[in-house]
Image (tube, rainbow, N blue to C red):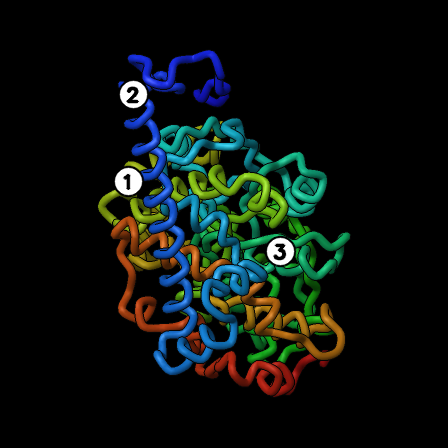
Amino acid sequence: MSIHKPFDPDRPLFSSRCSCGLHASESEHHAAQLRKADVEEDSANFIEASLVKALFPQESRRRAFLKAVGAGGAMSALSGFLPVGSLQAMAQEKAPLEKKDLSIGFIAITCATPLIMADPLGFYKKQGLNVTLNKTAGWALIRDKMLNREHDASHFLSPMPISMSMGLGSDPRQMRVATIQNTNGQAITLANKHKDKRDPKMWKGMKFAVPFEYSMHNFLLRYYVAQAGLDPDKDIQIRVTPPPEMVANLRAGNIDGFLGPDPFNQRAVYDEVGFITILTKDIWDGHPCCAFGTSEEFIKKNPNTFAALYRAVINASTMARNPENRPLIAKVISPQNYLNQPETVVMQVLTGKFADGLGNVQNVPDRIDFNPIPWYSMATWMLTQMQRWGYVKGDVNYKDISEKVFLLTDAKKYMQETNAPITAQAKANTGNPKFRIMGKEFDPATAAAYSKSFAISKS
């Protein structure tokens, strides 16, 4: 509700108070309004200059861009593909929230740690938000609830916002990845009867579970067995299984193994029904897994709310990255309304000191991490694998899709503004770092050739 009163022509111009009742006189009121306008203009100019500098680090290209769009036209040009409104809201943290009561979906896995811990540790409330976390049974339901607008924002598998935006497996709706929720944090777990079959070359005829078709789990399992010479569509069976059901299916003998999220790899060891054969960090160290995001529609309608939500999740991610905080985090996310897992299981995942089911206690501090930066090249790699395995037909505009879905500029800018730790690579890179996956380099600049470079594929 506005605090300003309508102008009253009968009101004396020089009363003891101004028209809004907050200032001693009308002259002070007008002076305050001018100061506010100056602040807002300075903020907008700062955001415009920062965006242009971030997108065009080289001064010559920056000048060429500004010359092309004309004086004052940069913001208009950028708003076509960046959520400029949300960035402006971040620069004005006290802007009123359009919507305070939010419904956010999540799957009960450690990948969602920042999103979950932000509730019991008060990160949402600090931003003025009343968040209801809705535990959801599976990824298809997460997708449907976002498409039906039942959830305002959600925990996603990183490839899901891409597939949803492209209309793969559902009606198209533009989604945006605000942050990566976690890196690493997955494993391939086999049933105990297969302890003599740790070499993937021996997996022909075996049945594996993954949580969703459009998941890093599916793409990494396919990559791993293909590197061992097996065709994932012919030599093994891959079944979509909700993560909470993976251990039960392993125990019942319905599957031989799964590439799934924690804590279920560790839970299989805890229940003595399986063993961890390889962590996914040993396939691709630093790979993305889950993400936090929402629809483009929500961002446009609620830029201040989106900014507040962004701040809450980024701040939670910063806390989660510190190993010293992991024991506390394990304690607050283990209860029934969140993960519903034994605290010792969650602690082993988050600290990286764990029993592997083979009689060893391993110490892998970066078994899971919570680096929130959504690199464009991460999205590009996912697109190459969708193309490789036939989920996408024909040519793909990697750059356009990656930059439309992954909000890299937002994440880096806000992390810098809040002094969140950012690696030297993140500060220096414009969005497309190269990665090495099982010894093979991925350069996003040559994505099309990369997708066709594999001996085993459908493309």
Labels 2, 3: front one: 2
To which residue does mark 3 refer?
160
Q: Earlier in the sequence, mark 1 or mark 2?
A: 2
To which residue does mark 2 refer?
25
Q: Earlier in the sequence, mark 1 or mark 3?
A: 3
- Taking depth in this image into account, of 316 and 67 the one nearest to the observer is 67
* Residue 441 image position (x, y, % from top left): 46, 83
Q: Quadrant of the C terminus?
A: bottom right
Q: Residue at x 58, y 58 (%)?
A: 257
Report the amino acid beneath label 2.
Ser
Q: How many marks?
A: 3
To which residue does mark 1 refer?
327
Q: Callout 3: few (<14), some (14-19), or many (20+) C-alpha neighbours within 10 Å?
A: many
Q: In the rendered image, which quarter is residue 372 located in?
A: bottom left
How much space separates mark 1 and mark 2, taking CA atoms? 56 Å
- Taking depth in this image into account, of 312 and 235 the one nearest to the observer is 312
Q: Earlier in the sequence, mark 2 or mark 3?
A: 2
